[in-house]
Each structure stands twice: as C-alpha cells, then as structure tokens.
Image: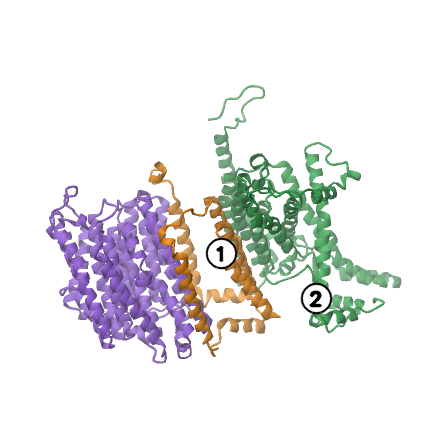
Amino acid sequence: MQLPFSLQPLFDFLGQFTDGPANALIIVIALIKIALIVGGLLQIIPFIILFERKIISWVQDRPGPNRAGPWGLLHGILDGVKLFFKEEITPKGVDKPLYLLAPGLTVAPAFLALCLVPVGPIIQGAHLDALVSFLRLDPSIIGPGGIISEIPLAITNPNIGILYVLAVTSIGVYGITLAGWSSNNKWSLLGGIRASAQMVSYEITLSLSIIGVVLLAGSLNLYNIIDSQAGGFWHWNVMAQPVAFLLFIIAMFAETNRLPFDLAEAEPELTGGFHTEYSSMRFALFFLGEYINMVIVSAMCVTLFLGGYHGLFPLPWEAIATWITNISPSFAGFYPWVIMASYLIGPMVIVPAKVGFFIFLFIFARATLPRLRYDQLMDLGWKRLLPIGLINLVITSGIIAIDLMVTGNGQVELATKWIIGAITLGLFLAWDLLYYSPRRKAQLEKDYRLYPKSAKKGEKPALAS
Amino acid sequence: MALVIYYVLFGITVLFALGVLFNRNTVRSAICLVGVMAALAVNYLIMRQEFVAFIQIVVYTGAIMVLFLFVIMLLNLREPEVMPWYLRKARFWGGALSLVFFFTLALAVQVWTVSGVTPGAIENEAFIKESGTPEVILLSTLMITKYVAPFILTSILLLVAVIGAIVMAKRYDEDGQEIISEEEVS
Amino acid sequence: MANVLLILPELTIFLAAILVFKCLILGLSVLHVWRVAFAGSLLGLGACLITLGMTGEPFHPGIYRVDLFSQLMKTVIAAALVLVLVLSDSPPVMRRDAWRELPFFLLLSSAGLMMMTSATELITLYLALELSAFPVYALIVLHRDRRMGSEGATKYMLQGMVASAVTLYGMSFIFGLSGTTYLSEIAAALPELGSQPLFWVGLLLLLAGFLFKLALFPFHFWAPDTYFSSPHPVATFIATVSKVAAIAVLCRMVAVAGWNEASIDGETLRIVLIVLAVAAMTLGNLAALVQKDFKRLLGYSAIAHAGYIVVALQAFSSLGHTAIVFYTIGYLAMTWICFMVACEVGRNRDTVPVSALAGLWQRSPMLALCLLIGIFGLTGLPPTVGFIGKWFLFSAALEDGQFLLVLIAALNSAVAVYYYMRVLRVAYLLEPAKEDTGILAPSPLVVTGAMVACLVVLWMGVAPNYFWEIAAEAIVALGATY
C-alpha cells in the first residue's frame, strides 16, 4: 500500500531552509504531533468544564446546565466566547508588567509539560519501515538505520523526561504567586502566598513518590518507565508502589490547587484569591491553566503508576493481524489496519479513559470534600506525607537493591515488585489503622467536642469533655 | 547558528542580572533573579547537560526562588525613604570598584591563552558519547567515587542549616514559656 | 578499617555531635548535654593524638589528605574546642533555651574546621568552610539581648556569605582553567597554569573566604563587631578555633601555588599578600588604640595578628610556614586566655568594657595573673610565646629579604604595646567599680584550662624547640605532598 504520490520532493524543498530534509521532516512531524495533542486537548477542555458542572449538579441534586444545545453541550464553548468578548479591566495600582505576565506564566508551563505526555508507543523497526514506504519517503532519512530511526507518539521524548515535568510544573507556581502580589489587593496577596507555600511543600511529596517509580524502571525516561510496566495490569507500578500512588494523588490535588486544597482561591475567605482582580481573557487563562494542569498531572499519574498506554491485558497484535490475514485471502489487506489500530488504541481509547477517570476523581472530590484549613494542610504535607514518603522510599530502594544484588541483571523482577507493594501497603495500613486513626479520632473528638456516639436521637447530648 | 544562540542567551542573562541590581522594587528584582536562573539552565542545556539544567530549574527556579519571593512578600519591603549617610556614596564607589574589577578580569581573559589541559567536562562528554551511558548514571557514579567527600559533607551541611534555622526561629523555651524580645514588649 | 582510623578525629566529633543531638531530642538537662559534648570533645582530642603519626587518604585518592600537618592542626583544633567547651557550660549571656544547643553547634563547626585542614579538593574545601560557618551564624543570634545578637550575626553572616561566594567564584576560574578540582592535579598543571594571569586572579579570589576567617585587611570589618556582639563563649570560638583552620588552609594553598619553582608569577600573589599584611597590621593596631570595649579591642588585635601571620606567609618558604604553625599554637593559647578572662569578668554582662576589668587583681588574683600572661603574649614580651613566635615570623620574612616589611611589622608591635598595657593598667592599678566588687571565682575546670594554657604560653616561650620541631616536621609532610 502506498500513497499515489511521494512526499519526498516536499521535504527536499523544505530542507533547503532547514539544513537538510531530515531536519525538515523532524520539524514537520513535531508540528503534526503538537497540532494533534495540544489542539485536541484545547477542544476537549470546554467539555471537561461542562462535565464538571454536570457532575457537581448531580451530586447536589439539580439539573445543571441544560440550556445551550442538547444536554447543555454548548455551555463550555459559550463560556469561552463570553470571556473572550468581555472588557479587559486593569485595576488601578497594579504592578503592570507582572500583572500582565502572571496569566502567561500559569499557562505556558502547563503547555510545556504537555510535550512529554506519552499517548502511544514508539513507532520503530518494521512498522516504521512500512510507514516510510507508505509515505514514499527516502529510507536513508527516516526508517530503521536512517537519521530518524523512531517516532515516539509523544511530542518529544528526552532522556530525563520525568525531571523535565517536575521542573516545568514547578515554574507554574510563579503565575499564581505573582498574580496575587501584583494585583495590589490583600486577598489576592494572601492567596498568592498560600499558593507558593503550598505548592513548594507538596512538590516534595510529589517528587518522593516519583523516585520509587524511577528506581523500579531504572531510568528517568518516560517511555522506559512505561516499558517497565508492560504486560498487563499486574505489572503496573501501582502494584509495586501503592503508597506512593496514594501520595501522588494527594500531592496532585495540592499541586493543581483543586479542592480540598484550593486555599489559594478559597471563595468564602479570599473572595476568589489570586485571580480576584483579573477579568476577561486573562481570567480565562488562569482557568485554562488549571484545567490543563489537571490533565497533565492525571496523565503523569497514568504514565508513572497505571501503565500509560498499555491496556489492562496485553494483546498480541501481530498474532491477531496474522490470524485475520489467514482466515481468508480477501482479508490480507487488513494487516496494516490492525497494526495501526495497535498504535492508535493508546491515544484514542486507553489514555483518554485512564485520564478521564482521574478527571472524574478531581471533580468528584470537589463535589464531596470540604476544604482544609491552612494549618491542617501544612500539617498533612510536612508531618504526615513527607515521613510516609521517605519510609516508603527507603523500603523500596532497600528491596530493589537486594533484588539487583541477587539477580544481577539490572532489572526488577515481578515478584519483587509485589513484595515491595505488599510490604509498603501493609506497613502503611498497619500504622494507619492500628496507631494513627484511633488517636486522631480521639484527638478530634477532644478538639471539636463531637457528640459521643452514645447520645440518643432527640435528646440533647452532653458535650464530651 | 549556535554562536548566535550563545550570544543572545548571554545577553539575556546579563540583562536579567542587571535587572536584579537596578530594580528598585524587590519583587521585580527577585523575578529578574528567576530569569537569571532560568537562563543559566538554558545555558546548561546548550552545553548538552540536560540533567544539570533541569535540576537547576527544579531547585533554584522552582524551590529556592519561590521561597525568596514568599519571604519578600511577607516582609512587604518598601524602598527606604531616606538613604543612610554611609550609603550616600556607596553607589558611586561600588560601581567604580566593580568596573575596576571587571577590567582586571577582562584583561586577564584577554591575555589568556588556551592551554593544553583538557577540562574534565569535555572528557566526560566524550565518554558519554562513546559509551552511550546516560548522563545521570555517569553523574551518580562520580558522586559516589570521585566526589564522595563533598557528597557526604553536603548532607551534613543541609542538616546543620535546618537545625540552625529551627533553633533561631524557636519561640518557646524549656519551660514552655514564650520568648518575647524587648522590641515586641515595647 | 584503616580508612576509618584515618578519619577517626572527625568521626569522633561528628558522632559526639549526633549523640548530643539525640540528647537534645530526648530532652536531657543542660548539664548532661554539656557533659556528653565535653566527653566527646575529649575523645576527639584523644583520637587526634592517636592519628598524629598517620599518613594516608581515606576517600578517593586526592580528595582528602591525612598527614602530620593536618593531624597537628586537628589536634590544635580539638584542644581549643575542649577549652572553649570549658567556658560554654550554660553561659548566662545566651538565651536560656539555647544553652543546650550551644555544645552541639560548637562540635559541628569544629568538625567542619577539621575537615578544612585535610581537604585537598576544592569542593570539599568549600563545603567544609560552610559547615564550619553555619553553626556559628546560628549561635551568634542566640545572644540574651536579641537585638545585639541579630546585629552581630547579620554582620558576620552577610560578610561571610559574600566572602564564600567570592571563594566559589575564584574556584570556578581555577576549575575552568585546569578542568579539575583536585589540588594535586592543579599542582601538576601549575607550570602551564602559572603563566595565566586568570589563574592568579582565581587563586586570590579563592583565598578570600579564608582570609575572611582570619580577618585580614579587606575582610576584617566583621571581627570587632562580631566579637563585641556575640555571646562570650561564641566569640572565644570564633577568635580561636576557626582561625586555626583558616591558617591551615592558607598554608596548604600557598604551598601548592607558591613553593613551585615553575610559577614565575607567584610574585603577584606575594605583592598582594604584602600589601594586605601591611594594611591589616597598621589598621588593626591604630584602631585598637581607641577602643573602650575589651572584646572589640581583641578584635582589632586579631586583625593585627592576621597581618603578622601573613608577613611570614608571603615568604613562600618552609621556614615561614613552620613559624606560622608554631605561632598559631601559641596565639591560640594567648587569645583563649584573654577571652577566658572576658568570659569570667563578663559572666553576667552583655558586653565587657575595659573598665569592667578594673581592680581585677583584687577580685581574682588568678584571673589577673592569667590576663597578664595572655596580654604579655599578645604584646610579644619575652618570657612568652608571643616574643619568640613573632621572632620566628619576622626572621622568616627577613630570610627572604623583606627588610622594609619587617621594619613596619616591628613598628606596629611597638604601637601595640600602648593599648595592651592600658588593659593591664586598668586591671592592676585601678580600684574596682562600685557595682562589681564581688570576688570572681572561676570553676575548677576553668582554672585547670587556664593553667594548661598559661603553661603552653610560657613553655613555648622559654623552650620552643619541642614545638618547633613538630611544626617543622609537619611542614615537611605538607611539602612532601606537592
């Protein structure tokens, strides 16, 4: 199967400007991937917002947005349009350069982190060869052994992948902090200061929970991390690092400033927090940044703990394709389509499904959980999550070290993963159920003078002392 | 092409650094410092030290400078209205001295002849290219062999800094009494 | 195992610090914490004496060198630490809640100083410098008078940070030129590097952090202020223990850069050192003339003494280095004696003005005698090490043909007699002020320490050969490395 015309002359022509056709090809491939991933995400975000409003309305037992379009589908888009056409107001007394810079600083890191999300496997080897012959390109430029020997289905794939994500998301805090400060409004300032302290604190937990995964994979590269989880859900890192998974989820809520950790924009206290003084598109940028960040941390969680683009069960795509071809000669043309499906099922089905689950988790938490108090937030971050993360890391690295010493093949065995998971989860549950929770409960009852359980219905209970 | 990028980058770095010095507003100064850190990270990136570059961003841009900003915002520093007497001429003399130092350095660099000594970093990069070992592994190997003493010392140093900060910030003495300084009383 | 034995002194001090930390967490009383720390420092001194004859490299070769020079310096540091700890048992001049932390920070800082004497790799050297400085920054703040403590700490810390930043800047030049942070490799590349002006700029910048610790001329501003506004035991620590390590590092760096025949441009370094020495001596002595506070006076005297030491350092000869090592031991004992008197007299005072010493001979004859010996030593009068030590320092410079420099130094010593004698005049000839006529009774431990220190001052002054020989051997060991 081939295209009716060759694309090679196009790249030869572009190559005149870019120091060779290979560079032109690299740029074109990158642009296509950016257009698909970023563009696709931007289209989806209004619907995520609609989804959020719908779910919250169901939890609160009301119909929710249902005016624009069938099932209220156009609400998100109309919101965007409304924000776009509103008047931009710059209040008096703001620090203008920083005021203008802040929304950009929120959105830009979010988009930068998007570059790394692996939505599908790397196209290489015979499949790449097939693609090259389909596009009728010069195999010395692209193809196995050519200048471009692989095409990962992520915008880029640097060696230090996970570090890049951490670095870029850590910049995002500036947007909120500066927005709070430059607005020249005390509520905004409080929101900004809360955000900076909160995000720096929880970044430590986030990093600690990631290190265990990096140790298991033996690499910082996101594709290597996903490959180490290949072969069914029992290989996923969530089996080896259940405690780190929980920590990651908690830290992820804090990093995106979502409820129950949205102290930076706590409406009842700060009238809207850091974005009080923003309107129109600038406000929309904060909103956009928040939602992209949600998608990114969810995608990172999927990549690190839930096997990325791998499905629940490994499917032998090559065997299926061969089997279909063997049923009848007329099915021979299906072979490349099945292979293509094996590549597209990740970006089209598996990753959206997994990410969607986390988005739902975000929304459901918002609908059901109350906001933490600031001291509780810091207490949780520094006194609970940080020690748990450290102990988890010590146990994990110890067992991995023993495993590597015994087998000596530089890879962590499946059984070892399960042992790590069992030990860490067991210790965590034992600590929580036997030690922490009873004491915490007693303390809470003492602090807040909760009604004792023995109080009967209808009678005014005596306060517990 | 690479040379142009270098010069643009150096220009940006210097501009940000000057911004740190000449901004009257402390928050803007701090933001310029963030810019310097980020520009340095890009510098490492151009030298193909990806790990160092992103660690630079994570540590300096993402953590230390955020705490800087946090403290500055809490203190709510304003420009002092009256310059103390000992600072009246400080700007002039400070500027003059740094100019002298700059020209001394420039002179020293100008007469500098490239020596035959191979800098270690170049050796390392050649090693990475030949063996295909990821940079992270090479760095960590160096850290526990050739630079083991600094590695240990750093951890002790951080511990000391943490304990020192806690002791200084302590507000309650042995008996649980709050320590009140004199200015707070008055 | 042999490697562990080589780093035994540092290890002992670190372990003692960790033990003290454990005691802090367990909430032991001040006395217990102090006892643990004191026992730890004594063990550290013992460990130094055990390792005195050893030579070797405990880590990757080239990072960390253990030889007679480093071990001698470590012994001196450990001994001085013991002496400082004697003074730091719950000093009333510090915040009460910080009494228990005081020994912990002193131990950690000393461990850093010990590592400085052995470090032969630039990053290790820098980190050890910082490790020795951080605890002291924290300690100064813990003054009873918060404002005074914060002022002293701010002055010390800001200048210390700038100095160590400059050091790091210099190191970056040297690393950029040579591609290595190992002193041995730098020394090997010196014939080539020595002709690069940039290397000498880098070296000078590198030395800044250590000259700061020594309080030499352009980095001296902190010394009087910090001595004045730190709690007395902490000031003692800064004035004695931390000087030793700075001197050790300076000796090592100069031995690397200056002793090498191939380095023609070593002259640049020498000229700079001469200028700094002259400025430091003159400034220190002249400013000390008008001081009213005893600790501030000692601060300016320390600046002058830094100048005297650099007079010998610029000779770039093993004789000069031997004189420095010899004088350092004596200087440490003399300074400690003076600060001991300040601690005892100012036990319940925030500051120690010279007038507080009035009538000391009535209040405590023992302290007065100690003050006499210490001040005689600092002045450089004959039966003490001050005289013979300065003699060695100046003769090393004379050997090198620096007649004019020695003349300036001698003139400076003559000027110094005035303010030192003024202290003695107040202590011996004036009646005590009305409000402090009470008898001063130092604890037995302090008396023992004072006796040991006085003995060292007099013994080294009368019969210097034993100490001189050890110093000479240590310098031979230092020179053998490069």
For residue B20, the mark is: 1
Instruction: Please identify the quadrant where the N terminus of chain A is shown.
Output: bottom right
Closer to the camera in the image, A48 or A441: A48
- Position of A40 with respect to B133 (left or right) is right
Q: From the viewer's perspective, is C336 left or right of A284?
A: left
B144 or C344: nearer the viewer: C344
Residue C19 x/y as whole percent: 35, 52
Mark 1 and mark 2 on one chain: no
Task: Please tell me whether mark 2 sits on a helix, a strand or a loop.
Answer: helix
Q: Position of residue A310 (x, y in %)?
A: 69, 55
The residue pinned by badge 2 equals: A26
Q: Is residue A367 above or below residue A103?
A: above
Q: Position of residue B99 (x, y in %)?
A: 43, 65
Question: Distance between the Cα atoms at labels 1 and 2?
Answer: 38 Å
- Which chain is painted in green? A
Q: Quadrant of residue C399?
A: bottom left
Shown colour of chain B: orange
Residue in the image at 25% along x and 72% along y: C320
Residue at (38, 56) in percent of width and height: B89
State the residue at coordinates (81%, 62%): A335
Chain containing the residue with disc 1: B
Chain purple in the figure, letter: C
